[in-house]
Image (cartoon, rainbow, N blue to C red):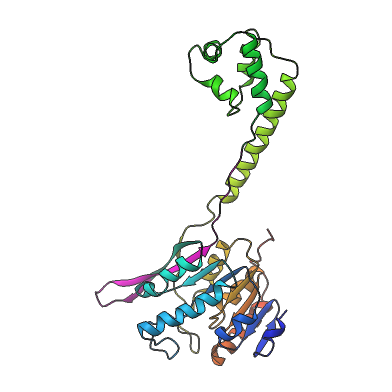
Amino acid sequence: MVPEAAKHFPHRIIGDCVLFNADCLAVLPTLGKVDAVVTDPPYGVLDETWDDMTTRELHRFTMGWLAAVALKSDTLLTFFAQEKRDAIDPLLHVLFDEQRQLIWNKQGGRVSEDGMFYSYEPIYYCHPTRTWAVCEPKALEVANLLKMAREAAGLSKGGVDMIVRGKKTGLCYRWEEAACLPTPEQVDLLRPAMLLPPGFDTAYQAAVANRDRVVSLAREQASLNAARTCDVFSVSPSQGRSGRHPTEKPLQLMMELLKVLNGADTILDPFMGSGTTGVACVNLGRKFIGIEIEPRYFDIACRRIEEAYRQPRLFTEPKP
């Protein structure tokens, strides 16, 4: 489960979780690809030794870890302070195809110097460009047979429109360009006006069946693409506990964020802290790789993940 190159770093394996007690910049190059990176990195807003950075130091640090994780996955969810966004925004646009901002609504927050609450925190969601298009098959045989029948009957395209709709609408042009099919009612109106050649009914029925199949696929894909959640997550911050990480995120929030990553089976967190992302992965039945440089927080993460495995698995997601 642990790549050979990573085995010389201190680590523990707990269930489907591999936890490293080391510098992520040293460990990351030894790891393989993962489905997604979910993390809460240092971003220079606290007086802690690991977070106290000048603007230049923050920019250099962010460039280092972000470039490293971009090699591990093309999908990233990362917290970052709104007031420090200039350190990460340009890099995300260079390293990832698509970026959008999710919002963690803290329902409160600390007071800024201008007297307003910092009541939300941005979460950057980066992922590959996702496109899906329906290429409707062209009913070329039907188009050719209609054109043959019209010409044999000595009718113009406008004349066919008059028979079907009582006015010139360009509908016959669309049929003969295979842009659409006549309805069964329109076919019934055409039969007395022109002799439809042998094989028309068979070709028409096949074209209708093919079109209906494509429409069904399009509807199915539209359902899969339908919104599953809102981009604002209203969750109260974790209550401060003695010995816990000072920026620990609520477990409920992390579980909701993981659900955004539908189908991501293996999650990497290079700044694991006290292991909340790992606990969320355990609860949802996902694999987890966590890296934490501070031994004290690493030990807390190990204990929390062990405890999560001892609890009944109430939230495990069904496999897609």
Q: Residue 155: x and y, percent?
A: 58, 10
Q: In front: 313, or 190?
A: 190
The residue drawn where x is 38% and y is 88% is: 47
The residue drawn where x is 64% and y is 20% is: 184
Magenta region: which residues? 108-135
On the picture, is 201 further left or further right than 143? right
Vertical comparison of 198 with 273: above or below: above
Q: Residue 272: x and y, percent?
A: 55, 81
Q: Quadrant of the C terminus?
A: bottom right
Does any portion of residue 258 appear in the rendered image? Answer: yes
Tally of numbered discs:
0
The residue drawn where x is 57% and y is 80% is: 275
Query: For residue 72, what is the image quadrant?
Result: bottom right
Q: Specify whether residue 109 is painted magenta.
A: yes
Vertical comparison of 227 with 268: above or below: above
Q: Residue 33: x and y, percent?
A: 64, 72
Q: Residue 163: x and y, percent?
A: 55, 10
Vertical comparison of 157 with 63: above or below: above
Q: In which quarter of the image is the N terminus?
A: bottom right
Q: Specify whether residue 47 is painted magenta.
A: no
Query: For residue 91, what is the image quadrant?
Result: bottom left
